[in-house]
């Protein structure tokens, strides 16, 4: 492995190599952009432990909610062309987005008559975006599904820490792999929807 060229490594191997180089250099500041991409579950957990033990400053951009919950002490809100401290955690941020979407919906509804009375001009059709109500509903469903999967994953870890028969261990491992494959897709969709809500809020 020591003589292996970086170009021949997989995405996960390259990510682990970069993390090892960071540890070796002992920096005072870490700027991490989606650090858990291509990492397996064990390496993700090791990264969380390492970041919590890191004595310097960490600035982290990630859609990995488990990592954010485990590592971050402060959150910053990027909105309307500015950045400011956000008072709260990820659950508070979710509530903030939903509240802003409701406020925007109320404003849109109050101006519906005026908009309808305006003359319609021929133009290129714009792509139809999901309504705010539908986005809010889907966000809530995704949030609930992710919480369920995270709870199942934690339970599987606890069970697999005990001595199990080979067949049972393989079965639990298969379930864990399915969860690890499903969670990133849900997290990506969650991030996409929150981005749409942020854009709608900023446009208001």
Image: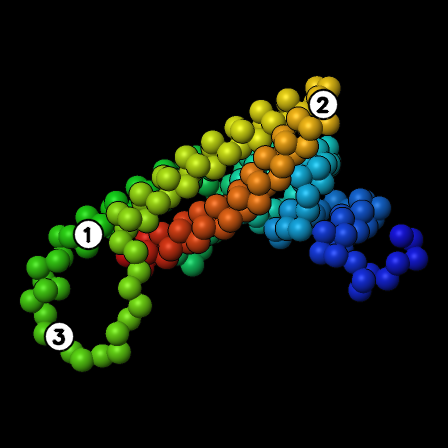
Q: Residue furthest right?
A: 3
Question: Whole-Å distance between the Cαs marked 1 and 2?
Answer: 60 Å
Q: Work out whether mark 3 precedes mark 1 in sequence or the reverse, and give the earlier one.
A: 1
Residue 156 can be seen, yes or no: yes
Residue at disc 3, secondary structure: loop
Q: Which residue is mark 1?
A: 107
Secondary structure under the numbered disc 1 in the rendered image: helix
Closer to the eye: label 3 or 1: 3
Q: Nearer the viewer, mark 3 or mark 2?
A: 2
| Residue topped by disc 2 | 165
Q: Residue tagged by mark 3?
A: 120
> How is the rendered protein coloured?
rainbow
Q: Badge 3, how many Cα within 10 Å: few under 14, some, many 20+?
A: few
Q: Position of residue 198 (x, y in %)?
A: 38, 52
- Comes first in the chain, label 3 or label 2: 3
Instruction: Please state if 191 lies on the left or on the right of 156 as rendered.
Output: left
Residue 191, position in %: x, y? 46, 50
C-alpha gap between disc 3 and disc 1: 21 Å
Residue, x 40% and y 51% (percent of image)?
193
Work out whether mark 1 precedes mark 2 in sequence or the reverse, and give the earlier one: 1
Q: Quadrant of the C terminus?
A: bottom left
- The quarter of the picture where residue 130 lies is bottom left
Is residue 31 among the parts visible in the rendering? Answer: no
What residue is shown at x 76% (from left), y 48% (from top)? Answer: 16
| 112 left or right, relative to 7 | left
Instruction: Please indicate whether residue 71 sits to the left or right of residue 50 in the image.
Output: left
Query: Looking at the image, which residue is at 32% across and 49% down?
Result: 135
Which is nearer the eye, 180 or 51? 180
């Amino acid at each position: 492995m020591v003589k292996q060229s970086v170009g021949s490594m997989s995405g996960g191997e390259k990510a682990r190599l970069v993390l090892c180089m960071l540890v070796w250099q002992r920096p005072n500041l870490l700027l991490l952009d989606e650090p858990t991409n291509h990492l397996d579950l064990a390496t993700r957990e090791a990264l969380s432990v390492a970041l919590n033990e890191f004595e310097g400053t960490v600035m982290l951009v990630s859609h990995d909610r488990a990592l954010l919950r485990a590592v971050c002490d402060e959150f910053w809100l990027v909105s309307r062309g500015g950045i400011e401290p956000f008072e709260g955690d990820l659950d508070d941020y979710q509530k903030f987005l939903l509240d802003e979407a409701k406020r925007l919906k109320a404003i849109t509804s109050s101006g519906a008559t005026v908009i309808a009375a305006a003359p319609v001009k021929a133009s290129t059709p714009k792509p139809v975006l999901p309504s705010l109500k539908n986005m809010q509903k889907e966000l809530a469903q995704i949030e609930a599904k992710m919480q369920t999967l995270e709870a199942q994953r934690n339970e599987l870890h606890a069970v697999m820490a005990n001595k199990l028969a080979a067949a049972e261990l393989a079965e639990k491992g298969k379930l864990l792999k399915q969860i690890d494959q499903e969670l990133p897709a849900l997290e990506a969709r969650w991030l996409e929807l929150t981005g749409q809500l942020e854009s709608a809020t900023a446009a208001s």
